[in-house]
Amino acid sequence: MTLQQLKYVTEVADRGSITEAAKSLFIAQPSLSAAIHELEEEIGVTLFLRSNRGVLITPEGAEFLGYARQVVQQAALIEDKYIAHSALRQRFCISTQHYSFTAGAFVELVRAQGGEAYEFILREGKTYDTINDVRTLRSEMGVIYMCRFNEAVISKMLREANLIFSELLAAKPHIFVGRNNPLAAKERVTLEDLTPLPCLTYEQGDQNAFYFAEEILSTLNHEKSIKVTDKSTIVDLMVGTDGYTISSGICPSYLRGDEIISIPLEVDELIRIGVITHRDYRPTKLGQMYLDILHRVVGGLKGD
């Protein structure tokens, strides 16, 4: 087993394709395939399942990749410090569901680093991908939510992935609407009030089970439904249509100013948003800094 082989498998995992990984590594595809095959033979583990659409990581491969990424990252730090003779470039990556406060904390982290060398990555995406990123150590931590409906399924998934959930905040459900929405003047709304309006949700791709929805009450039927993948799009739809989305009520003032209104929703539910990490996780300097900023940002926001 060589460091080069470990770099190869992590690149294939990140690209999802041997062809694309070969291009980024500037090597021939047959050479890359052969190197991976040799590694699989040596360790007795099938890392990837090949198909016409790319590669899929096997459960055993995901576990191996967790260790491989740590080795590759530590090697990169050594090269930066002792071989390249450059300033140590700090690295930090987080995966999260679509929350504005996680992005706000990320902005503060970037500002706090000033002119220091760094590589930061913020992945906003699907629930399953967020969990999988942390499971494979593609990201240092993730931010997701749980509620009464999905808690058993998500908790089981986290346990099997050797991940833990640390609660960040608990909030009563609210709806987000534009200031011109028919419900904007209400102090509280009911599910019946929402019936004639378009429901805005985040699309979850192949992992489209109700348990992976980013919004509570995911099993409800809606006469009008709009699914998106991008946070700015859902904000545009709230402002430009009568659509609504259900969330925690945590809405930073810088998110479209006073164009977005948060209204309590009268349902017997509780939204628990938390940070997921590996069970044996020890925060890096940047990871701890981000967690501290995240707690402060959340503490300074108003939810009902």
Image (cartoon, helix red, strand yellow):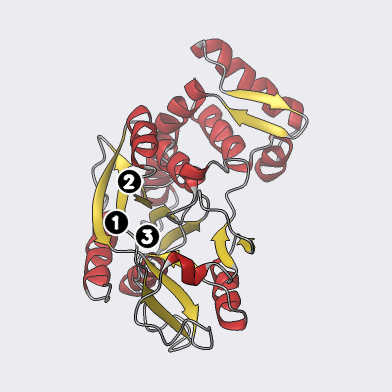
Mark 1 lies on residue: 270
- Indicate which disc residue 200 carries: none
Q: Which of 226 and 157 lies nearest the eye of the viewer? A: 226
Q: What element carries label 2?
A: loop
Q: Which mark's residue is nearer the viewer, 3 or 1?
A: 1
- Indicate which disc residue 87 carries: 3
- Indicate which disc residue 148 carries: 2
- Mark 1: amino acid: Leu
Left or right: where does residue 261 sit relative to residue 269?
Answer: right
Query: Which quarter of the picture shows residue 64?
Result: top left
Left or right: where does residue 262 sit relative to residue 303?
Answer: right
Q: Position of residue 43 (x, y in %)?
A: 49, 13
Measured along the vertical axis of the image, is residue 144 above or below residue 267?
A: above
- Mark 2: amino acid: Arg
Query: Which quarter of the picture shows residue 189?
Result: bottom left
Q: Position of residue 159 (x, y in %)?
A: 32, 31
Distance of label 3 from label 1 (alpha carbons): 46 Å
